[in-house]
């Protein structure tokens, strides 16, 4: 694994953990919205992934390397 890839994966993991930790707090401002986390902060939000992706591209952040998650009112578990 290259050093760049390892750094990107570590950053992605950090952003994902930030989202998990802050999920309850995010409900105040982002309930039923998609949010993009970059460098441990919310950098975009919207009603759809497409909307968030457009906002990320507009500010020069690669959506494919960004944590995008939905902030639900309640947790749900899907069993397949």
Image (cartoon, grey):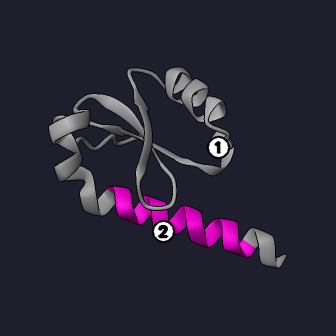
Mainly helix, strand or loop, the magenta region?
Answer: helix
- Packing grade of label 1 (10 A; few <14, some 14-19, many >=20) is some
- Image coords of residue 27 (percent x, y): 19, 41
As helix, strand or loop, the secondary structure at mark 2 comes to helix
Give the x, y percent position of residue 21: 27, 63
For residue 7, say whether it is visible: yes
Image position of 53 (left or right of 37) = right
Q: Quadrant of residue 69?
A: top left
Dot 2 and dot 1 residues touching (CB under 8 Å): no
Question: Label 2: which residue?
Answer: 14
Q: Quadrant of the C terminus?
A: top left
Q: Residue at x 48, y 68 (%)?
A: 14
Q: Position of residue 54 (x, y in %)?
A: 60, 24
Q: Between residues 43 and 74, which one lies in front from this camera angle? A: 43
Which quadrant of the figure contains the N terminus?
bottom right
Residue span colored magenta: 6-19
- 11 part of magenta stretch: yes
As measured in the structure, the alpha-carbon distance from the residue carrying label 2 to the one carrying label 1 is: 16 Å
Please name the residue that numbered disc 1 is placed on: 61
């Amino acid at each position: 694994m290259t050093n760049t890839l390892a750094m990107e994966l570590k950053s992605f993991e950090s952003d994902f953990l930030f989202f998990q930790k802050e999920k309850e707090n995010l409900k105040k401002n982002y309930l039923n919205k998609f949010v993009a986390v970059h460098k441990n902060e919310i950098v975009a939000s919207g009603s759809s992934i497409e909307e968030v992706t457009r906002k990320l591209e507009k500010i020069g952040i690669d959506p494919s390397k960004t944590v995008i998650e939905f902030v639900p009112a309640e947790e749900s578990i899907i069993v397949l």
